[in-house]
Amino acid sequence: MHFNVTIMKFSKTLVQWYLQNKRDLPWRKTQNPYYIWLSEIILQQTRVDQGMAYYFKFVEHFSTVEKLASASEEKVLKLWQGLGYYSRARNLHFSAKYIVNELNGDFPDTYNNIIKLKGVGDYTASAIASICFNEATAVVDGNVYRVLARYFNINTPINSTKGIKEFKILAQELIDPKNSGTHNQAIMEFGARMCKPQNPDCEICPLNASCLALANNKVKELPVKENKIKIRNRYFNYLVIQTEDDKTTLVKREKGIWLNLYEFPLIESLQPIDEKAIIEHEVFKEFFNKLNVSIQLFNSSMLPHKLSHQHIFTNFWVIKTPASSKFNLNWSEINNFPVSTLIDNFLKQYKTN
DNA sequence: AAGGCGTGGAC
DNA sequence: TGTCCAAGCCT
């Protein structure tokens, strides 16, 4: 019984702090599940500051789930361009079509049905169910892991199977069932603004008197995370075709990173390769067999593009050719295609030359 | 279950 | 500079 009192105090303290300190964010003005869904997908592994402009763009272009569903995937990906984790956009679009075509346009209104949407996992289903439908399902995101690991001094790795289960159960015990949406947003906002990863504001924290990590001087060690990712190096050689009549060619990526985005014809290698190797490569021969071409490296040294899990070193080879029916994309239309930030950065440089 | 999947801000 | 990691999900 004493523990229950503590639980209620925990939630009440968080919610009280939240109501006084919450940021004024656009998705906090609505309980429309479509908009909440949109915001939650955009904010997966993404900071509010980075996602905000995309939220406004999507609300403006797709004010309803029907409008999103009837758009082309290319349009959706183009609007998503620059935000990363593009499977979010593909799944968002897929699920919009599912809602319109299979659910008669009615957004699912329970955790169990919301989580059936592609791209929606335990976190997002809990967020939508609690915020929009007042279902008492606890969210566990990076903020919640941190707040709980510190407050209860838990050193189970948060990305282990055991940790995922343990923290979900704990979060579920702590939720205020009468106030689940606000509770969930409160603990996340608290983690983002007070119990920050670096330099948390423990001195002024409303929970500092009962925080076990603070009492045990473990704040900096928590939460524990295991399995550091290994970074692999990749070497990209893009064939930037420039015909005499100002045409070029883009191709759609068919696997791995940047799936369904567009890029120039690509020769990839495990180690850097030189111009001779490019010219002798099959892809090059396919495109330029018997054509009179000149080849020039655009960048002076390989351009590093660092992702969280791989480093891509890129050369952009500008290849000038006579007009050919093989190359029929006008340079003026190139901005209609969704491309990676790597390609986008190149295009900005190239066009100003 | 472990690895793939982006980008950019903070320190 | 490198390192961490952010309202995670999928396979």
Image: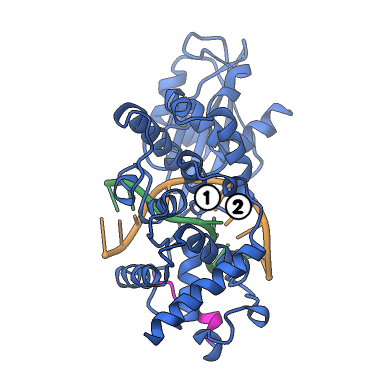
Chain colours: A blue, B orange, C green
- The residue shown at (62%, 45%) is A26
- The residue shown at (45%, 35%) is A267
- The residue shown at (37%, 34%) is A106
> In the image, which residues are magenta?
A218-226
- The front one of A219 and A211 is A211
Relative height, residue A10 to residue B7 (above, below): below
What is the chief secondary structure element of the magenta stretch?
loop
- Marks 1 and 2, how far apart at CA: 7 Å
Relative height, residue A111 to residue A286 (above, below): below
Give the total of numbered labels: 2
Residue A5, x across and y down, in percent: 44, 81
Judging from the image, what secondary structure is the residue with disc 2 in? Answer: helix
- Figure quadrant of the C terminus of chain A: top right
Q: Which disc, if any, is residue A229?
A: none
Drawn side of residue A323 relative to residue A4, left or right: right
* Residue tagged 1: A43
Circle 1 residues within 10 Å: few <14, some 14–19, many ≥20: some
Chain letter for mark 1:
A
Residue A219 is inside the magenta segment: yes
Chain letter for mark 2:
A
Residue A233, x across and y down, in percent: 47, 53
Drawn side of residue A266 relative to residue A166, left or right: right
Q: Which disc, if any, is residue A48?
A: 2
Residue A220 occupies which quadrant of the picture?
bottom right
- The answer to whether marks 1 and 2 sit on the same chain is yes
- The front one of A208 and A199 is A208
First reached walking from the N terminus: tag 1 or tag 2: 1
Residue A219, x across and y down, in percent: 55, 82
Residue at far right of view: A352
Q: Amino acid at mark 2?
A: Val
Is residue A260 shown to the viewer in this render? yes
Q: Pointers 1 and 2 in contact (CB under 8 A)?
A: yes
